[in-house]
């Protein structure tokens, strides 16, 4: 069975099936892509590694950013291209080996950092074509933050911005409750306590 078989079969409607409230979840994700670490400006390019069906493209494009995606699954690439039309580009490639023809201001990699065969080498490759920042999610129950930070620093990223991300993937919350949960992201000790059991961090790695 190929590495992408389970994604190939699920490509149609991927974002809607993965997230109980895909619009809200991806909008909040995009807001932090823009704001965490060095701020992105309209016209900046975001390269979305392991982009799936490019669900994240919609809120990024709405923010005035340019979008490019990369995915190893051919059916996912087809779904992403169908979604984007002429509003962006999508390449079929392994994120461990891909280098874009032009630098990107930001590179993202969500729910996929574990696909890096050698995390430090992966970060170095991304650093070679990323001008402002790399943004990705990090499960602190799976990876030690200190280890990931050391790998980023070895790749040349010397600024490390960390933010809890409390939008649930599988549950659609009423608006007021979702807003309250997002407010908890800035609550310091309470947020860190919650991360012992659930949710993830958003990380923005950049250069001073």
Image: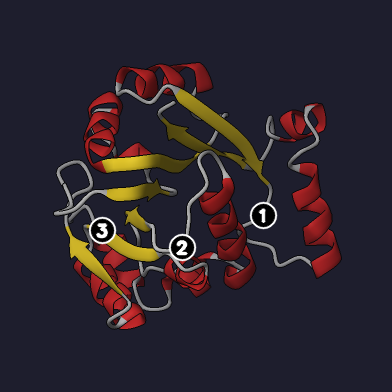
Q: Residues within 10 Å of mark 1 (few under 14, many from 20)?
A: many
**Residue toward you, 141 or 122:** 122
Could you tell me which secondary element the residue under label 2 belongs to?
A: loop
- Per the model, the C-alpha gap separating discs 3 and 2 is 21 Å
| Left or right, 204 with reference to 197 | left
Q: Which residue is mark 1?
A: 167
Specify how the rendered protein is coloured. secondary structure
The answer to which quarter of the image holds residue 29 is bottom right
Q: Residue at x 55, y 32 (%)?
A: 161
**Please, is residue 119 above or below residue 135 in the view?**
above
Q: Which residue is mark 2?
A: 42
Q: Residue at x 80, y 58 (%)?
A: 179
- All told, the count of numbered labels is 3
Q: Residue at x 51, y 51 (%)?
A: 33
Q: Position of residue 148 (x, y in %)?
A: 43, 23
| Left or right, 66 with reference to 33 | left
The answer to which quarter of the image holds residue 80 is bottom left
Q: Nearer the viewer, mark 3 or mark 2?
A: 2
Q: Residue at x 75, y 51 (%)?
A: 182
Q: Which residue is mark 3?
A: 70
Q: Quadrant of the N terminus?
A: bottom left
Q: Quadrant of the C terminus?
A: top left
Q: Nearer the viewer, mark 1 or mark 2?
A: 2
Could you tell me which secondary element the residue under label 3 belongs to?
A: strand
| Left or right, 174 with reference to 147 | right
**Residue toward you, 33 or 142:** 33
Q: Position of residue 44 (x, y in %)?
A: 39, 57
Which mark is first along the chain, 2 or 3? 2
- Per the model, the C-alpha gap separating discs 3 and 1 is 24 Å
- Per the model, the C-alpha gap separating discs 1 and 2 is 25 Å
Q: Position of residue 105 (x, y in %)?
A: 35, 49
Dots 3, 1 in contact, CB < 8 A: no
């Amino acid at each position: 069975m190929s590495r992408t078989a389970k994604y190939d079969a699920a490509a149609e409607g991927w974002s809607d099936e993965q997230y109980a409230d895909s619009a809200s979840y991806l909008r909040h994700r995009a807001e932090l892509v823009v704001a965490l670490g060095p701020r992105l400006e309209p016209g900046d390019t975001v390269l979305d590694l392991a982009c799936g069906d490019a669900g994240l493209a919609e809120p990024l494009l709405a923010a005035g950013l340019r979008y490019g995606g990369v995915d190893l699954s051919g059916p996912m690439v087809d779904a992403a291209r169908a979604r984007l039309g002429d509003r962006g580009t999508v390449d079929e490639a392994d994120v461990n080996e891909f280098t874009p023809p032009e630098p990107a201001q930001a590179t993202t990699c969500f729910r996929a950092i574990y696909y890096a065969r050698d995390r430090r080498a992966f970060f170095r490759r991304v650093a070679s074509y990323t001008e402002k920042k790399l943004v990705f999610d990090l499960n602190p129950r799976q990876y030690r933050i200190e280890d990931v930070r050391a790998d980023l620093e070895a790749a040349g990223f010397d600024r490390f911005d960390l933010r809890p991300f409390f939008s649930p993937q599988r549950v659609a919350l009423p608006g007021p409750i979702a807003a309250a949960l997002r407010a908890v992201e800035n609550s310091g000790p309470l947020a860190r306590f919650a991360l012992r059991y659930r949710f993830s961090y958003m990380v923005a790695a950049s250069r001073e």
